[in-house]
Amino acid sequence: MDRQRVRGKGGAINFRTTPSPISARLADELIGRLHSLPYPAFLDAIAALMDRAGYYDAAVLRRGTDRNSDGGVDLLANAVAGLGSVGIVVQAKQYAEPVQKRYVDEIRGAAVRYAASHAVIFSTSAFSNAACDAASKGASVPVILVDRSKLADLMAWHRIGVVRTKDGLAIDPAFFEGVASRHKEALNRLDSLDANHKRSLLTVNLWFGDRTSSSESPRCGS
């Protein structure tokens, strides 16, 4: 398939369309590699795909696995549209089970709050029938669903985690090792900081423990 047919206006990819499917073996291996990544590294892989696909300023908003004040938005990105640009909100689901409808509703609401042109949900699994129905409804903000098969095809097409060898397309171990190692180093630093923080708290507790009556509650603002 011609690469230009995969891209939308302004050069950014149209995630409703994908290139020709890759082999089931390579797709399964790609999804397996994505599942093996720490969640923050998985988000970086999705950001790299968006960047390669023609979006710009793809930024990870959160690093944890729980919802937060961003309303379930994992990444923000922009795409050129005419003489200006439009914003996109993204959720990235590192799931084995189907993604449910509530996430479609959640990201659509977030798109309204962020004044985004549309929303995208990437998943390493499938989507429930209810989620697909909700995304396809003629709402003011379109929600594009990228399931495991489409995600694998896009990664292969844009050479994210995939390289071409003399025998055809193959997994690029260096990509996955690179995104994972960056976060392992960060986690190691956090573990070290946590240990120092715990020692400090222990020192503080021991210091004040001898000076505060067990029957006296701490007072604030007095």
Image: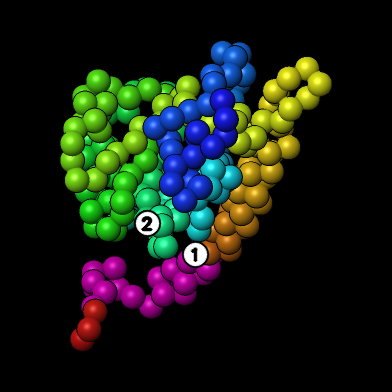
Which mark is first along the chain, 2 or 1?
A: 2
The color scheme shown is: rainbow
Q: Where residue 26 sits: x, y (%)? A: 62, 18
Q: How crowded is mark 1: few (under 14 residues within 10 Å), some or many (20 or more)?
A: few
Residue pictured at 61% horizontal, 48% vertical: 183
| Quadrant housing the N terminus | top right
Q: What residue type is labelled 1?
A: Leu
* 72 lies above or below 36: below
Res. 101 visible in picture: no
Query: Residue furthest toward the bottom?
Result: 222
Q: Where residue 129 sits: x, y (%)? A: 25, 20
Q: Regarding mark 1 in the picture, which secondary structure is present there?
A: helix
Q: Is residue 115 left or right of residue 145?
A: left
Taking the magenta stretch, the answer to whether it contains residue 48 is: no
Q: In this view, does 160 lie to the left or right of 145?
A: right
* 68 lies above or below 147: below
Q: Is residue 3 left or right of residue 65?
A: right
* 77 lies above or below 23: below
Q: Is residue 34 left or right of residue 110?
A: right
Q: Where residue 94 sits: x, y (%)? A: 45, 33
* Residue pointed to by mark 1: 202
Question: Which label lies toward us, 1 or 2?
Answer: 2
State which quadrant residue 180 falls in: top right
Q: Which amino acid does label 2 sit on?
A: Val
| Quadrant housing the C terminus | bottom left
Taking the magenta stretch, the answer to whether it contains residue 202 is: yes
* Residue pointed to by mark 2: 86
Query: Residue furthest toward the top?
Result: 24
Residue pictured at 47% horizontal, 51% vertical: 10
**Span highlighted in magenta in the image:** 198-219
Q: Residues within 10 Å of mark 2 (few under 14, many from 20)?
A: some
